Image (tube, rainbow, N blue to C red):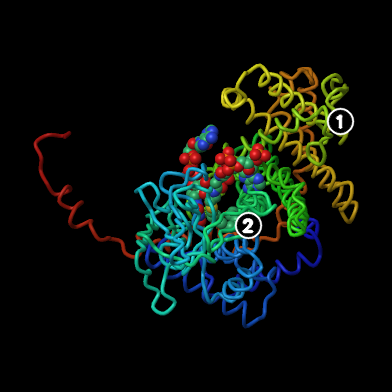
Amino acid sequence: MKVAWAGSREAFQVSDRMAKLVANDPVFEKFSKPMLGRKELFKNTLRKAAYAWKLINDLRLTEEEAKWLRHYIDEPNYTDLHWEMFVPAIEGQGTKEQKKKWLPLAQTMQIIGTYAQTELGHGSNVQGLETTATFDRQTDEFVMHSPTLTSSKWWPGGMAKVATHAIVYARLIIDGLFHGVHGFIVQLRSLEDHSPLPGLTLGDIGMKFGHGTYNTMDNGVLRFDHVRIPRNQMLMRVSQVTKEGKYAQSDVPRQLLYGTMVSVRQTIVADASKALSRAVCIATRYSVVRRQFGSRNGGPETQVIDYKTQQSRLFPLLASAYAFRFVGEWLKSLYIDVKQRLEANDFSTLPETHACTAGLKALTTAATADGIEECRKLCGGHGYLISSGLPELFAFYVPACSYEGENVVMMLQVARFLVKTVSNLGYKQPVGTAAYLGRVTPLLQNNCAVQTAEDWLNPDAILEAFEARAARMVIGCGERLAMFENPEEGFAELSIDLVEASLAHCQLITVSVFIQKLNHEIPGNGVKRSLEVLCYVYALFLLHKHQGDFLATGYLTPKQASLANEQLRTLYSKVRPNAIAFVDSFNHMDHYLCSVLGRYDGNVYPKLYEAAWKDPLNDSDIVDGIQQYVQPILKQKLHYAKL
Ligand SMILES: CCCCCCCCCC/C=C\CCCCC/C=C/C(=O)SCCNC(=O)CCNC(=O)[C@H](O)C(C)(C)COP(=O)(O)OP(=O)(O)OC[C@H]1O[C@@H](n2cnc3c(N)ncnc32)[C@H](O)[C@@H]1OP(=O)(O)O
Ligand SMILES: Cc1cc2nc3c(=O)[nH]c(=O)nc-3n(C[C@H](O)[C@H](O)[C@H](O)COP(=O)(O)OP(=O)(O)OC[C@H]3O[C@@H](n4cnc5c(N)ncnc54)[C@H](O)[C@@H]3O)c2cc1C
């Protein structure tokens, strides 16, 4: 199962080696992080990042190994933006000459970059950005300027204190004409003494949610006061500006300017299963250790994992972690394919890839963030302790619902893709993830054939149910949209339904990828059978949760919906004996989990007790402030019993 989770034996070995490297090195200790102040926390992160870079070079780690190393260090920092956004932006949007100049500098970290798109006034609406890049023909330069307070760049990670360079998105202006938003490589700091270059105002935007998690990142604010950069620092794969000031567009579509976001959204989907599996591992192990009620004749109480209600909250999350792992793997292969096509100037699959990355980013991050919080509740009161590992994990993860495209905004992008697909149905056969929309007639006409709970243990029945639900919701939206004279008005009016239809479409993708995975790639019958159980749990849990959709579209009868739920209960009993094996298969080490409740050895209570004594408040019996503020209250003699 560890191999099935990792994707291959080699992938397992690489991640396992890197997990151990990090866990066994005292530099990467992280349990004390929540006790540090912001400055200490930040310096500590800089120290770890520098040491990691040294390890990567000394041990000659491959790109894959380096990624795992950074992952297990488990502290967001400036290198995330450098490797995941700055470098890919140059790779995807730079010309050959630009790549030749900038990539070697970035790949050896002689320069450190960030991705400066969002502003104080605009994040989702990229076309609304206000920073200007005005071409000056006399000097062959662009003048970068922040004309308003709301045009201040706001959020870019690593920008406040570390990055030497940034890809800055700004409105291109030539001779007073606006030519859309483009990316520019801008140096921010001196490579000699790290001071901000003239004309730039740079700072940190302040503390974020959770203490020891995202505050290791220096998210920054940046303002330009007429800062000049050479013309050849505009990323020019998509559009070019000549020294005469002529604006030209190559036959590469404009959407490629957004290519870095497609790349990172894909990574975010791949990473969702890591965060969810981490929370599920903690909650499952603790649910086996924790006992409440049910003692008979002085025997042990019931392990909380044996309560059906606990199973009904925990096991769907376990199944979701596996589903997200597989859909992340699938999306990665879709992305690698589109990347190769784009390099060969084949842009045909870009709209579908954009819809898949946007929609799956929204689906997986929302479910993961909610899932982590549910795992915290599944651990009862102790889940609220920092030492459970869950509050910090939640604080770390939850911004994924907003960054890289706010989730609702992303679902609306999926909706645009689906509406377009439906409106082209007469003359363009949908392919890939939308192929089912080419079979609307049977999907709209045939209803579910399930008659017994057993009938639900059938991948074809499940797939058809999810296809029919999504098709009916999408087609229904299409029909209602057609009644509006102005399509944009209609889209806005129906946006709630459109987001729901998009979710149904994305859930269909996750369910069908899980089923495909079982059909083709699982080594070993035992592993396959166990994963089949999880696949059914995932699908039937979604069916139960969204049964309103399945009923309202008329595909299911209430009886069939209740049979699905009956089957789900039976499936939970099948998951229970393997629950610990399922979570051990994630191969998460104690160092990575950073959780007393999720310890591999289950030695929860003594370690919880021990961890409590490490709190700085327990350094002495009488702490600072008691003499000054408590003793006087105790010693005063008031006339009234109550104030
Ligand atoms: C323990 C484990 C924990 C795991 C932690 C998880 C994190 C791990 C991940 C690690 C990786 C990296 C670390 C990074 C940390 C996060 C850093 C965050 C960075 C950022 O947030 S950067 C800023 C991101 N900003 C956005 O995403 C903005 C969102 N807005 C947009 O994308 C767009 O503006 C839009 C999609 C809303 C479009 O707006 P609109 O104005 O309508 O569109 P137009 O500009 O006019 O374009 C319309 C056409 O273009 C198509 N389109 C849009 N986007 C794309 C795209 N990306 N690719 C292809 N095509 C695109 C759109 O569909 C329209 O097409 P049409 O004309 O209809 O055919
Ligand atoms: C931790 C973190 C790190 C970040 N790192 C970076 C970075 O490195 N570089 C960078 O450039 N940016 C970064 N960002 C910014 C991030 O990309 C934006 O915050 C994100 O894209 C959301 O945009 P917004 O803040 O403008 O949200 P808004 O769009 O203002 O969202 C507010 C609300 O409005 C709703 N809404 C907006 N538009 C629509 C619409 N059309 N229809 C319906 N509802 C709508 C949303 O659903 C949401 O509920 C980061 C953000 C965070 C939280």
Lateral position of residue 39 relative to residue 254, left or right: left
Instruction: Determine which residue is flagged by label 2.
Output: 602
Lateral position of residue 608 relative to residue 474, left or right: left
Mark 2 element type: loop
Lateral position of residue 163 relative to residue 510, left or right: left
- Place of residue 66 in the rendered image (x, y in percent of width and height, measured from the top left): 64, 70
Mark 1 / mark 2, whichever is N-terminal: 1
**Residue 471 in sight from this viewpoint:** yes
Q: Nearer the viewer, residue 197 or 445?
A: 197
**Residue 572 in sight from this viewpoint:** no
Q: Nearer the viewer, mark 1 or mark 2?
A: 1
Residue 461: numbered disc = 1
- Place of residue 642 in the rendered image (x, y in percent of width and height, measured from the top left): 17, 33
Residue appearing at x 53%, y 48% in the figure: 179
Disc 1 to disc 2, C-alpha distance? 40 Å
Disc 2 marks a residue whose amino acid type is Gly
Position of the C terminus by quadrant = top left
- Place of residue 312 in the rendered image (x, y in percent of width and height, measured from the top left): 68, 36
Residue appearing at x 61%, y 75% in the figure: 104
Q: In this picture, is 613 found above or below 574?
A: below
Task: Please tell me how crowded label 2 is: few (under 14), some (14-19), or many (20+) other residues with Cα within 10 Å.
Answer: some
Disc 1 marks a residue whose amino acid type is Ala
